[in-house]
Image (cartoon, rainbow, N blue to C red):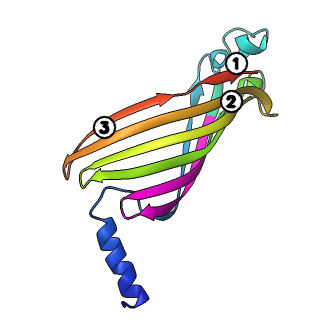
């Protein structure tokens, strides 16, 4: 047999034949910021029955993060378990209760149908909260799929379909 280091190199070469994401842990983070001239429309004022104070401006921050661990289930497939968090944090005290945050956890199945054709299926559940004190806003779910066809090193076609049912609380 091959030495473990050589076996890993051979496995990486075989993995590169298909457009599947790499095995192992993957994480990302993003930070956005800005100024909203009508922050009362940013959150859930009408749904929660708040009396809005008119057009209130506010700075905001919009951090997000995600983490996924992918296992090789076969030479042409991966199974990923993931979490994504997304926040809208309003900076003005008058509208901070309109801030939102959502959390989603789920599974993704990545399939290499051919060298240039990949299919990704996803199922997840999550929750959205209103305000900075975690007031429940909705329960959410996700069912989705994405078909990717690579036509060359710089050109790819994607077809993505998602259903995101949500139950307001």
User: How many angstroms separate mark 2 from mark 1 (CA)?
Assistant: 8 Å
Residue designated by label 2:
100
The answer to whether residue 129 shows anywhere in this view is: yes
For the residues marked 2 and 3, what is the alpha-carbon distance in whole angstroms? Answer: 30 Å
Residue at mark 1: 44
Residues under numbered marks 2 and 1 in contact, where contact means CB atoms less than 8 Å apart: yes
State the residue at coordinates (50%, 41%): 122
User: Dot 1, crowdedness within 10 Å: few (<14), some or many (≥20)?
Assistant: some
Residue stretch rendered in magenta on the structure: 61-83
Name the image quarter holding residue 141.
top right
Determine which residue is flagged by label 3. 158
| Residue 96 relative to residue 86: left or right | right
Regarding mark 1 in the picture, which secondary structure is present there?
loop
Judged left or right of residue 149, residue 152 is: left
As for residue 37 lying within the magenta part, the answer is no
Density class for disc 2 (Cα within 10 Å; few <14, some 14-19, many ≥20) is: many
Kindly identify the residue that appears in the image at 26 percent across and 63 percent down.
Answer: 17
Residue closer to the observer: 35 or 114: 114
């Amino acid at each position: 047999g091959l030495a473990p280091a050589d076996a890993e190199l051979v496995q990486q070469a075989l993995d590169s034949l298909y457009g599947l994401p790499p095995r192992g842990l993957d994480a990302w983070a993003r930070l956005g910021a800005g100024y909203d001239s009508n922050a009362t429309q940013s959150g859930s004022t009408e749904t929660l029955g708040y009396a809005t104070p008119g057009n209130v401006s506010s700075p905001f921050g919009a951090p997000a993060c995600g983490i996924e661990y992918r296992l090789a289930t076969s030479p042409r497939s991966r199974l990923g378990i993931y979490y994504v968090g997304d926040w809208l944090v309003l900076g003005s005290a008058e509208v901070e209760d309109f801030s939102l945050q959502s959390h989603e956890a789920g599974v993704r199945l990545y399939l290499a149908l051919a060298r240039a054709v990949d299919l990704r299926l996803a199922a997840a559940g999550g929750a959205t909260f209103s305000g900075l004190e975690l007031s429940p806003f909705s329960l959410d779910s996700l069912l989705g799929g994405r078909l990717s066809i690579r036509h060359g090193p710089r050109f790819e076609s994607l077809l993505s379909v998602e259903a995101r049912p949500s139950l307001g609380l």
